[in-house]
Image (cartoon, rainbow, N blue to C red):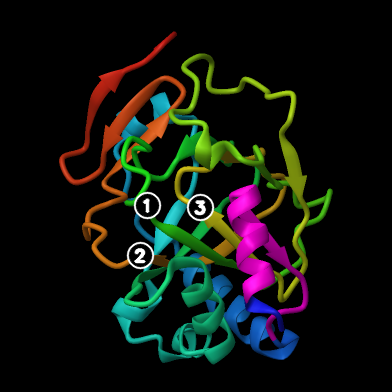
Amino acid sequence: MDYHALAKRFWQQGYLVIENFFDPQLMARYDSAIQTHFNAGPEVLFNQEFLDKSDVEVVPWFPLREGQELFDEVGQDPRLSQLTEAILGSGWGPQYCMVMWSPPGSKGQAWHQDCPPEDQAHFNLNRLVYTADITDAIGGYTQVVPGSHRRGELPAGPTDQDFADQVTLRPKRGTLVLLHGHTWHRVQPVQQHRSSTNYRAAPAGTPEDITDVCVYCNMRYRFSTEEVVEQRGLA
């Protein structure tokens, strides 16, 4: 695997898709654990104001915090570590493992940036692992705007606006998607339940709370205090 070439492509696009990166049997075990957890009816962590204003309907789960050691297998994969270092440089650090689950008939996630884009040196890297195919029947395709990690703040406006240069990703089981935290991205509405597992990482020197403030088309939201810190556009 040519990590240097992959890193170059990532920095050109602001994202990278690698199919068949993970073993399908491991992904099936992950998917079974995810379904077992969410079938139990986990607690929704976001408050209603955030859900109403953000057009986001996802439920997070942090399996490693609950002792689910199975989820450490991907985090310890040496290929993933080498690719991450090729992108972020030496001294990069892992943040946390988070499963994002969307129930049937949900909105998905509106356009957003995971962290404010003013400081180009400080960002998170999403390392998204797909344990099942994302299909037309399931819905919930991820859309990204290539190169938008270099274009500054996500434009203000309606949460459901489209961009002329947006592209749609259709990952399969075992696909790895790397996504810069400043890249404009969203998840389309979900028909059936849908999940991805995110092994977030960041370059050396990045604040631990880099993703505490998220940028949406209509606001900036701080998760730690559960408040809108800036109204934008048509909010």
Q: Residue at x 34, y 38 (%)?
A: 116
Q: Please tell me the numbered disc located at residue 203.
A: 2
On the image, numbered disc 3 is attached to which residue?
180
- Name the kind of residue labelled 2 in the image: Pro
Amino acid at circle 3 = His
Quarter of the picture containing the N terminus is bottom right
Question: Which badge, 2 or 3, is on the more N-terminal residue?
Answer: 3
Is 116 drawn above or below residue 132 in the view shown? above
The reply to whether the C-beta atoms of the residues labelled 1 and 3 are less than 8 Å apart is: yes
Spatial separation of the CA atoms under disc 1 and disc 2: 7 Å
Front residue of 187/20: it is 20
- Is residue 158 or residue 18 the one in the foreground? 18
Q: Mark 2 falls on what kind of element?
A: loop
Please provide percent x and percent y for residue 215: 39, 33
Residue span colored magenta: 4-22
Query: For mark 1, what is the residue?
Result: 123
Packing grade of label 1 (10 A; few <14, some 14-19, many >=20) is many
Instruction: Identify the amino acid type marked 1.
Output: Phe
Question: Is 101 on the left or on the right of 97, as rendered?
Answer: right
